[in-house]
Every structure is written in C-alpha cells, then in structure tokens.
Image (spheres, rainbow, N blue to C red):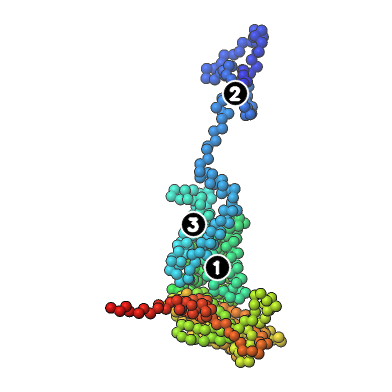
C-alpha cells in the first residue's frame, strides 16, 4: 500500500511554520484528498502535472467487451488465406456434386439466379464505393459481399469448366478449360482481388457469355457458329447495359467507365469469338460419353451391341505393357464405336469421323475423306450410339477424330496397330453395350443381369 500525499507536502511537522501561506483555492477547482490511499499493482501511473489528482477509476480498462460478431471478424482476419481457399473449394465441390446434364432446367435456372445476384452486387459496389454508406437494408450484410461475390464466381466458373471438360478433346480445348480453371483459382488470390472492378468485369463478361453458350443450343435445339455469335451478342448487350448504368452514376468520369467496364468487358467478348473460330472452344452442348476401338461391332438385337476385342497385355506382365493396342491379322479392320450425347429435342445434326495415320515420311496424314453420319438425340444420358471403320490398316500410330460438320473437334482417340505374332485362333473379349448403360458391360455380367431380370414361371396350383 502506498500513500499518495499532496505534492511537496512537508513530511516534518516542524517545517510547517516555515511554509508560506498558500493562496486561496477557487471553489470550482477540486482539491485532492491528502489522505486518499491508492492501491498500486503492476499498472504504471501516467505522468500528470503537479497538483492534478489521479482518479482510481481511470486506471481500470474500460475497453468494450468484443461481441460474437467481433470475434468472428477477428478470426476471419487471422485466417484470411484459409477463408479464401474454403470459399474456392466450397463453390467448386458444390458444382462437382450437383452438376447434371447441360439441359437440366434446375441447373439453368440456378445459374441464371447466380448471375442476377452477382450482377446486382457488382452494380451496388459501383453505386456505393468505399466511403459511401450503403442503404440501411444492406448495412448488416454489406460486409459479406466480398465473400458472396467470390463464391458466386467460383460456382459459375466451375460449372462451366466441368461442362466444357465433358465436351473437350485435344490439346487446344483442354488449354481453354485450363484457362478457366486458372481464372477460377486466381479469383481467390489477393493480387487479383486488388485489381478490383477490372478483374471482376472480365469474370462477369466471361460468365454471362458462357451461360448463353450453354443455354441457347438447348433452347434452340441446334448448334453452330450463328448460335455462338448470338451468345456473344447477348453477352455484349449485357456489358453495354452495365456501362450505361454506371456512366449515369459517374457522369464526370468517362475514363473510369471506359477503363474498368468497356475495355475488359468487350475485350472478353472479342477473345471468345476468336477462340471459337480457331476451334479452341469445344462445341457445346454435344459430348462423347464413351468411345473405344474394337475388332468387331455387331448389333445382335434392338438396343444391344456386342463389342469384340483382343488384348494380349496383362497387368502382371510388364513386358506386355508396350504391346500394340490393336493386334491385327489378315483382313482385320478397326471399328471406332462411340456414344454421343445431345440435349432432348435436339435437331438432327451431322458428324464426321476422320482417320489419321502417322506416316514415317509424311507425318500425320488423313486417311480418306472421312465418314459423315446423321446423328439425332434419343434423350438418354448415354446418348446416340454409332460406329465407323476403315480399311487397309497399317502397323503404326493411328488417330480417330470425331468432329462437327463445320470442323469443330468433339472427340479424338489414339491407338497403335501391330501384327499379331500368334497364328492360333484368337479368343475375343466381348463387351455388351446397352441403351441405358453408358459404359459397356462384360458379357458374363450382362448375362447374369439378364437372367436375374427374368421372372421364373409359376405353375398354377391345382384346385
């Protein structure tokens, strides 16, 4: 316990007579109690001017007790990177789990709702930038807009990426899908977040047009350059509408609208159109669900195909891993069997199957003019089944390419052909392709399933 006495007060009573009389104290000025005792702990008293009294209550910490929301915000600030990763993978995994066919009505409506909410949030950010208080009905949720924007971007881009991946084949389309994935990952990086409206306008322009690229072929029942051009036109119209609206809010800053809205928004539209022309963007909405090379393809009954092949490679014999995919004997022909999906009520369209051979002198050369077939949608998940073949097979590397009528690649399959050293009769592995099963089933498994589905005949009881 320390006793706080008046500053410079005499400690010896004999010295009191020698101290001159103090001037009268104003009644409005508080006088310190010379007998007040203050308990001191580890707290360091602040320096005060002589004659100023320290109130004991001033030594007590009066900071506001943090609320649950304050604690949540502090936790988010400490784990900002993990939070971004969580929202990234949350949106991506949600689409992986819930993704369905491209013509699924619920998916199309859901993505449209995402675009509406996302566009509204981005417009509200332009209307109420930092330093401008948002409307009262948005005050409580305004702090969460950043996470909501990135979650919506992640969900939309991941959905489009998965649909493109199903329709992609070859190096160039996969590069485009890889670019979408890179934007999806960059969407969560602080560096790109600092770019602000420029990066967001790029992502929004891409999302709007890709939505129409998925929607229009389903709604119109056809695909092609003009359908894609219409999607780009609708995407450009959306960007133009946003540009006009933001220009009203910033009438004296046209450079801002040009730099942050017009250039990134219309630049994405021009890039998408160019990528489609050169064949980088795959031809949505068709996609190959299954494809393979076989020695024989036989339609044994309505909806049932037998697919026969010979494969001498064995997983426990490493020396057989490098054997050719297609062992050929005299008279053998390769059959390219595929299942191609198109949405319901899709109009009949043409596909072309091209065969390429890696000639030792000329390199990859086309073998023939290709085989054109009319394909229609049967409304099933597996799609329409078809097969094509070629003659004059040579040992070496081969490639089969399935493309649309205007030359957009749908699928490609590479295989090697080599002479069969065995002269004994071959035993074929037979798979069965059904209408409902996307992948062929081994013959034995299909026979067991067929036998189990047949109800045993019942003998009527005698009366």
Q: Position of residue 30 (x, y in %)?
A: 54, 20
Mark 2 highlights which residue?
39
Q: Pointer 1: what residue?
A: 161
Residue drawn 59% across and 50% down?
79
Q: CA distance from mark 1 to mark 3?
A: 23 Å
- Residue shown at 52% from the left, 70% from the top: 163
**Residue tagged 3:** 121
Residue 296 in the image: x percent, y percent? 56, 86
Which x, y percent locates residue 220?
44, 76
Picture residue at 59% right of the left edge, 16% below the top: 34
Q: Nearer the viewer, mark 1 or mark 3?
A: 1
Q: Nearer the viewer, residue 119 or 23?
A: 119
The part of the image, by quadrant, that contains residue 423 is bottom right
| Nearest-to-viewer mark from 2 and 3 | 2
Does 51 appear above or below 127? above
Of 202 and 350, nearer the camera is: 350
Q: Is residue 267 above or below residue 295?
A: above
Q: Which comes before the other along the chain, label 1 or label 2?
A: 2
């Amino acid at each position: 316990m320390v006793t706080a006495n008046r500053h410079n007060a005499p400690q010896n009573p004999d010295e009191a007579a020698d101290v001159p009389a103090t001037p009268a104290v104003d009644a409005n000025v508080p006088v310190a109690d010379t007998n007040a005792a203050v308990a001191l702990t580890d707290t360091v008293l602040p320096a005060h001017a002589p004659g100023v009294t320290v109130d004991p209550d001033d030594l007590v910490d009066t900071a506001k007790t943090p609320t649950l929301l304050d604690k949540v915000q502090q936790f988010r600030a400490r784990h900002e990177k993990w939070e971004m990763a969580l929202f990234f993978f949350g949106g991506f995994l949600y689409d992986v789990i819930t993704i369905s066919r491209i013509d699924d009505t619920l998916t199309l409506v859901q993505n449209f709702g995402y675009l509406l909410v996302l566009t509204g949030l981005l417009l509200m950010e332009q209307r109420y930038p930092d330093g401008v208080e948002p409307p009262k009905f948005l005050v409580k949720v305004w702090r969460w807009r950043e996470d909501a924007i990135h979650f919506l971007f992640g969900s939309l881009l991941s959905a489009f990426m998965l649909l493109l991946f199903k329709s992609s084949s070859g190096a160039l389309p996969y590069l485009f899908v890889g670019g979408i994935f890179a934007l999806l990952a960059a969407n969560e990086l602080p560096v790109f977040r600092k770019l602000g409206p420029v990066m967001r306008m790029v992502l929004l322009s891409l999302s709007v047009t890709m939505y129409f690229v998925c929607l229009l072929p389903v709604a119109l029942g056809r695909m092609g350059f003009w359908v894609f051009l219409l999607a780009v036109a609708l995407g450009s119209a959306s960007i133009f509408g946003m540009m006009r609206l933001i220009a009203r809010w910033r009438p004296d800053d046209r450079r801002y609208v040009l730099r942050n809205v017009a250039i990134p928004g219309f630049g994405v539209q021009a890039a998408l159109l160019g990528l489609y022309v050169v064949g980088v963007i795959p031809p949505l909405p068709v996609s190959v669900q299954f494809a393979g090379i076989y020695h024989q393809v036989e339609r044994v009954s309505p909806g049932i195909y037998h697919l026969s092949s010979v494969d001498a490679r064995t997983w426990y014999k490493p020396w057989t891993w490098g054997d050719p995919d297609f062992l050929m004997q005299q008279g053998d022909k390769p059959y390219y069997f595929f299942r191609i999906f198109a949405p319901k009520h899709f109009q009949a369209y043409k596909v072309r199957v091209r065969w390429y051979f890696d000639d030792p002198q000329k390199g990859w050369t086309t073998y023939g003019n290709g085989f054109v077939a009319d394909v229609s949608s049967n409304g099933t998940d597996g799609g329409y089944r078809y097969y094509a073949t070629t003659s004059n097979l040579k040992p070496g590397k081969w490639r089969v390419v399935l493309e649309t009528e205007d030359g957009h690649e749908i699928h490609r399959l590479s295989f090697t052909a080599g002479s069969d050293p065995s002269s004994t009769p071959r035993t074929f592995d037979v798979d069965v392709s059904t209408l409902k099963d996307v992948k062929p089933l081994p013959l034995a498994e299909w026979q067991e399933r067929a036998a189990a589905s047949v109800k045993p005949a019942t003998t009527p009881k005698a009366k």
